[in-house]
Image (tube, grey):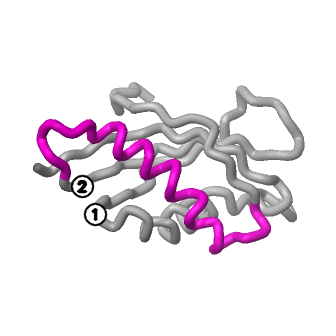
Amino acid sequence: MRKAIQLKVSLEISKHTAGAGGSDNTPQLVRDVLASGRWRHPRLQMSVKDIALDQSVAGDDRAHVVATVWVEGEDAPADDFAKLATQAMRDTFPAGHWRHPHTSIVVKSITEDSGDDNT
């Protein structure tokens, strides 16, 4: 059965590469790492819908980013697709780290996103 879910993934990214030199490459970095780590879950299609800096978190050594990711794939009707997609996100970011080896990326939280923001 084809299933899909939209997730909000909160990340901490080391600033020495995220936004270094006055050029913010954070959105591309997140997309690169996600694409590079997809081999961990080849049955799932993952696409970044939005990337935003989280201004509510203060700190000077890391960028706090919230990525909205659409995850789609085949799963048995009785299986918990949200659990599978959440674990896929936890596996994919570290697996794609080889693309940017001098960058520290930490998955802080993953939540289901209803996608009904009025912004």
Q: Quick one: SS at disc 1?
A: loop
Q: Nearer the viewer, residue 18 or 14?
A: 14
The quarter in which the C terminus is drawn is top left
Above or below, 111 against 61 in this view is above
Which residue position is annotated with label 1? 43
- Based on the displayed image, in which of its 4 quarters is residue 58 positioned? top right
User: Which label belongs to residue 92?
Assistant: none
Predominant secondary structure, magenta span: helix
Q: Amino acid at mark 2?
A: Gly
Q: Nearer the viewer, residue 50 or 86?
A: 86
Which residue position is annotated with label 2? 73
* Label 1 close to label 2 by CB (< 8 Å): yes
Q: In the rendering, at what x and y percent does residue 113 appear?
A: 39, 32
Q: In the rendering, at what x and y percent does residue 45 appear?
A: 32, 60
How far is disc 1 from disc 2 in space, using C-alphas?
6 Å
* Total numbered badges shown on the rendered structure: 2
Q: Is residue 64 within the magenta segment?
A: no
Which stretch is magenta?
Answer: 75-103
Q: Amino acid at mark 1?
A: Arg
* Residue at image location 71% in from the left, 26% down from the top: 56
Marked residue nearer the N-terminal end (1 or 2) = 1
Above or below, 27 against 87 in this view is below
Q: Is residue 99 within the magenta segment?
A: yes
* Residue at image location 75% in from the left, 46% down from the top: 63
Q: Nearer the viewer, residue 72 or 31?
A: 72
Q: How dense is the environment of label 1, judged by Cα within 10 Å: few (below 14), some, or many (20 and up)?
A: few
Q: Is residue 118 left or right of residue 67?
A: left
Above or below, 118 against 34 in this view is above
* Residue at image location 80% in from the left, 46% down from the top: 62
Q: Is residue 63 left or right of residue 96?
A: right
Q: In the rendering, at what x and y percent does residue 11 appear?
A: 64, 44
Q: Is residue 56 left or right of residue 7?
A: right
